[in-house]
Image (spheres, rainbow, N blue to C red):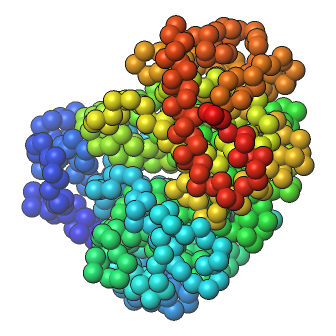
């Protein structure tokens, strides 16, 4: 900052602050030549125009009460927490720690140091580098005595020894000690004070700090003052690689959790979503093990009468879209806990997909992208700073993180004391054979919860010529920590205790599989969901649907009869029966992994081909 002040005083061309070259740099033009109306004074500064970068920040006159005075108060920012950082190995004589910095400060630092820009609507646009999504193959759980008998070990939860964790933890702290600024955010996971945990995030990027400011529950000034020792700590040194030759490392990326130390270390990936899902993994462990409550990868909303609906579903099934209902309050869009006292959101914000986003299709999300929000890996117009949500040249996984308060009909606080009345399990069946709605028995609910079915469609990847089934147990396989049967058992117990109705809703194809049929119109799916909430479907007349033994309504006002029973919508009945048997066989093969751990009545609740 002192260099910037010197530059203003000298006002010479050579005083222009340089920025590291960007691989997609287009050209460099004198700012006063491209924007003469904005440069009444002849200042020889320049603007760098990037396709996905940031311009040079024109020097401005700094008031005597400018941010340096705030920045310098390191001790005041962390108070009695100073001792913790010293003991953890942080070089307090060198680094500058910014604890729970306001969004405006994080904006300034991200623009100044990270190449971020402000979008036309006020959101911060930043980039995660090489990694634009999670790295599940590089996720590790430390194998130690306090948790080893609880974890569901395998391809999702890969073992790491304690010594390797200590090496990577020290590597992360050593890297953070080389940074001028280290950001700390202290917040909560879980809106119910009875079950929440205190989370501390330590990172080197302002955009990561702003992201977690949005995704965790933000403490009040009084809560922050008395925050005390955190229950869980994330060391995010994602800009620095893991050592591939360290035991247990498969690449330069490592995302690891130690339940004994209640710490997470991130190396070799700057994708912000790793922190979000790390917190969820910890809650997915602690809630059942420590608190005896059921953590769920789901969205949730509540009606005026206090009737809560949980929505389970994988990516592309409509979980976010269908839970955003103008007639109901949104509790949350992704992570919840079904407790003895009700339902509460784990998070303080939303992490929404932005690809093909429009104000017409998803107005709540579109309008939430304003000052304080983070746009991640979103392409923008370099002149107007207008985001191009249709551009997937960086990644299909473009995202926006914003506080849940930015959603107009959010339930604040995100906690209700009533128990769920309905559970909706969403699937996008590209084979076109599952009905748009079916009422599930308790055993069928357990079966489909464990199966977690949806499908990839042809055209999404090279060489995909027909629908590919995806089975993600508990609708959260990448984040599962305990054995899936444990979550399924808790779900069944709570459903029985509270007499909860469960529905399987297919938002996929009808009248034929992908390529010959058509996607079930959203207006019909919304009508079905409305009928669930009104109780209309609970009173409907039902018939049995073939191989899957599902109960489907005979009629529902506003929904065509041939849509309710998929067999009626297929012109080629033989082709329909062939696809039904094919999908049923896929279910049976996928469910074989859990058959030995469930009761016979649950095994028999799935499709029967014999």
Work out whether residue 130 or residue 424 is closer to the camera in this orientation and state it: 424
Residue at image point 36% right, 40% down: 396
Residue 406 visible at all: no
Q: Position of residue 427 (x, y in %)?
A: 58, 34
Taking the image as shown, residue 521 lies to the left or right of residue 388, namely: right
Q: Looking at the picture, does residue 130 appear above or below residue 496?
A: below
Residue at image point 28% right, 56% down: 130
Q: Position of residue 428 (x, y in %)?
A: 54, 31
Q: How many marks?
A: 0
Work out whether residue 408 or residue 514 is closer to the camera in this orientation and state it: 514
Residue 243 visible at all: yes
Work out whether residue 62 or residue 395 is closer to the camera in this orientation and state it: 395
Where residue 145 sits, quadrant-wise, is bottom right
Where residue 245 sits, quadrant-wise, is bottom left
Work out whether residue 319 or residue 223 is closer to the camera in this orientation and state it: 319
Check the picture and name the quadrant holding the N terminus: bottom left
Residue at image point 22% right, 33% down: 37
Taking the image as shown, residue 228 lies to the left or right of residue 292, namely: left
Where residue 510 sits, quadrant-wise, is top right
Q: Position of residue 63 (x, y in %)?
A: 39, 60
Taking the image as shown, residue 351 lies to the left or right of residue 329, namely: left
């Amino acid at each position: 900052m002192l260099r910037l002040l010197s530059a203003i005083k000298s006002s010479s061309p050579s005083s222009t602050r340089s920025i590291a070259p960007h691989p997609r740099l287009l050209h460099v033009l004198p700012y006063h030549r491209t924007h003469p109306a904005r440069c009444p004074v002849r200042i020889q500064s320049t603007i760098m125009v990037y396709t996905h970068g940031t311009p040079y920040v024109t020097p401005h006159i700094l008031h005597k009460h400018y941010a340096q005075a705030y920045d310098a108060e390191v001790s005041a920012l962390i108070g009695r927490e100073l001792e913790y950082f010293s003991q953890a190995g942080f070089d307090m004589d060198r680094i500058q720690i910014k604890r729970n910095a306001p969004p405006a400060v994080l904006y300034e630092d991200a623009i100044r140091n990270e190449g971020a820009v402000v979008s036309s609507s006020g959101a911060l646009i930043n980039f995660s580098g090489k990694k634009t999504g999670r790295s599940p193959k590089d996720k590790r759980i430390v194998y130690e005595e306090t948790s080893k008998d609880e974890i569901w070990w395998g391809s999702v939860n890969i073992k790491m020894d304690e010594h390797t964790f200590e090496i990577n933890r020290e590597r992360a702290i050593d890297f953070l000690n080389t940074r001028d600024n280290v950001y700390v955010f202290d917040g909560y996971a879980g809106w119910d004070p009875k079950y929440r945990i205190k989370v501390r995030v330590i990172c080197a990027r302002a955009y990561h700090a702003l992201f977690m400011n949005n995704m965790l529950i933000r403490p009040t000034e009084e809560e922050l003052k008395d925050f005390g020792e955190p229950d869980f700590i994330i060391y995010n040194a994602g800009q620095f690689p893991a050592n591939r030759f360290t035991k247990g490392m498969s690449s330069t990326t490592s995302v690891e959790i130690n339940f004994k130390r209640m710490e997470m270390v991130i190396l070799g990936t700057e994708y912000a979503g790793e922190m979000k899902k790390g917190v969820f993994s910890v809650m997915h462990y602690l809630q059942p093990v420590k608190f005896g409550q059921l953590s769920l990868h789901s969205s949730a909303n509540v009606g005026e009468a206090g009737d809560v609906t949980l929505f389970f579903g994988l990516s592309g099934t409509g979980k976010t879209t269908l839970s955003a209902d103008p007639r109901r309050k949104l509790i949350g869009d992704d992570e919840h806990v079904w407790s003895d006292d009700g339902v509460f959101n784990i998070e303080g914000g939303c992490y929404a997909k932005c690809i093909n986003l429009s104000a017409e299709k998803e107005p709540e999300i579109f309008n939430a992208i304003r000052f304080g929000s983070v746009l991640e890996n979103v392409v923008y117009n370099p002149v107007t700073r207008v985001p191009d949500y249709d551009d997937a040249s960086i990644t299909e996984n473009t995202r926006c993180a914003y506080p849940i308060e930015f959603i107009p009909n959010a339930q604040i606080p995100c906690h209700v004391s009533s128990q769920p009345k309905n559970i909706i399990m969403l699937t996008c069946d590209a084979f076109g054979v599952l009905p748009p709605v079916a009422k599930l028995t308790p055993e069928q609910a357990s079966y489909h919860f464990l199966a977690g079915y949806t499908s990839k469609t042809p055209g999404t990847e090279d060489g995909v010529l027909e629908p590919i089934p995806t089975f993600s147990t508990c609708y959260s396989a990448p984040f599962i920590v305990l054995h899936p049967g444990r979550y399924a058992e808790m779900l069944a117990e709570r459903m029985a205790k509270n007499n909860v109705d469960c529905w399987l809703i297919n938002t996929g194809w009808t009248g034929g599989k992908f390529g010959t049929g058509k996607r079930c119109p959203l207006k019909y799916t919304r009508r079905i969901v409305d009928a669930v909430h009104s109780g209309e479907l609970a009173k409907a007349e039902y018939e049995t649907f073939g191989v899957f033994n599902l109960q489907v309504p005979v009629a529902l006002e506003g929904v065509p009869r041939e849509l309710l029973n998929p067999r009626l919508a297929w012109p080629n009945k033989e082709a329909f029966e062939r696809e039904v048997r094919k999908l049923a066989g896929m279910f049976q093969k996928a469910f074989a992994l859990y058959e030995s751990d469930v009761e016979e009545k649950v095994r028999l609740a799935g499709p029967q081909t014999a």
